[in-house]
Amino acid sequence: MKKIKLILCVIFITSIAQAQTVEINGSVIAGKDVEGIHVMNKTLNKYTTTNQLGGFTIEAKVQDTIVFSSIQYKFLSVIVSKANVDSKSITVNLIDNVNELDEVTVGKVLTGDLSSDVSNSEAEKPIDFYDVGIPGYTGKKKTQNERKLYEADNGKYVSIGLGVGLNLNKILNGISGRTKRLKNRVKLDQDDEIIRSIREDIAKDFFSVNQLDEILHMDFFYFCADDENFQKRCKDKSPVEVFQFLEEKLKEYKANLNAKD
C-alpha cells in the first residue's frame, strides 16, 4: 500500500512539474538575417518575434508546440521538452527556403582581350557608393539579393566574331537556374516587406472590423502573399486598396478553414 501511495505521489509531482509554465529564452540560428522571425506557442496562444540576434522570450511548458515561420526560412515545429523547461532555454536551426547552388565559374585563362580578361579576373570589385553609403547614388538602395540578381543578369559581352557578342555571364546563370532562384529570393524579400508594412499600418484597423483569431493573423498574411497579384494589389497602394484586397482574401481564407474542418 505504501508503494502504491509513493508511486501516485511521484506521478502527481511529475504532472505538476510538466504543467508548470515558465518563461523560456530562445535563440534562432540561420544562415542570414535572423530578425523578425515569427515565434508562436500554439498550445498557449502566445506570440513573439526574434530580435536582431535571433533571440526571443516566450512562455511555455512541457509538451507545448512552438512553431517558427518566416518567408526566408522553412517552417519549423518544435515540441518543448522537460530539459527546455528546466534550463528555461531552447535553440533552433532554420533552413533557407530557397537553396542556392554554387556559382558557375568559367576558367581563368588570359586571352589578350582586356575586357574579357578583366571580367574573368579574381580581383575583388572596387568599393562603390553602395558599399560605403557615400552620397552619390540617390535612388533606393538595392537589397543584397537584388544586387546578386543584377550581377547574375548582366555582364560584359564577349565577341565571337563577325560583330556578334555573347553575354556568357547571363547565359550561364540562366542555364544553371541561378537567375531564376535569385528572382524568387527577391520576390520573397519584397513580399516580406509588404507584409511588414501591412502589419504596422493596416492590420489593427482591419482585424477590428474583420474578426480572425490572432494566432491565425500571420498565416493569413502568408496566404495573401501566395496570391499572384499580391504585389500588384498591395505594393505602393493606398490603405483603402489594400484593405479591399485583404477583405477579398479573408473570405477565401475562411472558406479554406471551413473546408478543412
Image (spheres, helix red, strand yellow):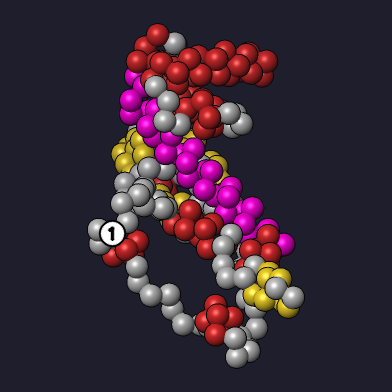
Is residue 101 toward the left or the right of residue 79 in the image? right
Q: In this view of the protein, which residue sits in the foreground, 129 or 242?
A: 129
Would residue 29 be found to the left or right of residue 248 on screen? Answer: left
**Magenta stretch, overall SS:** helix
Q: Nearer the viewer, residue 175 or 16?
A: 175
Q: Position of residue 50 (x, y in %)?
A: 35, 44
Residue 70 visible in image: no
* Residue bearing the label numbered 1: 136
Residue at horizontal 67%, vertical 76%?
159
The stretch of residues the image draws in magenta is 175-204
The residue drawn where x is 53% and y is 43% is 187
The answer to whether one can see residue 163 in this image is yes
Amino acid carrying mark 1 in the image: Gly
Q: Residue 171 at x, y = what percent?
A: 68, 64
How crowded pointer 1 is (Cα within 10 Å; few <14, some 14-19, many 20+) is rated as few
Residue 192 point in image, percent of width and height: 45, 39
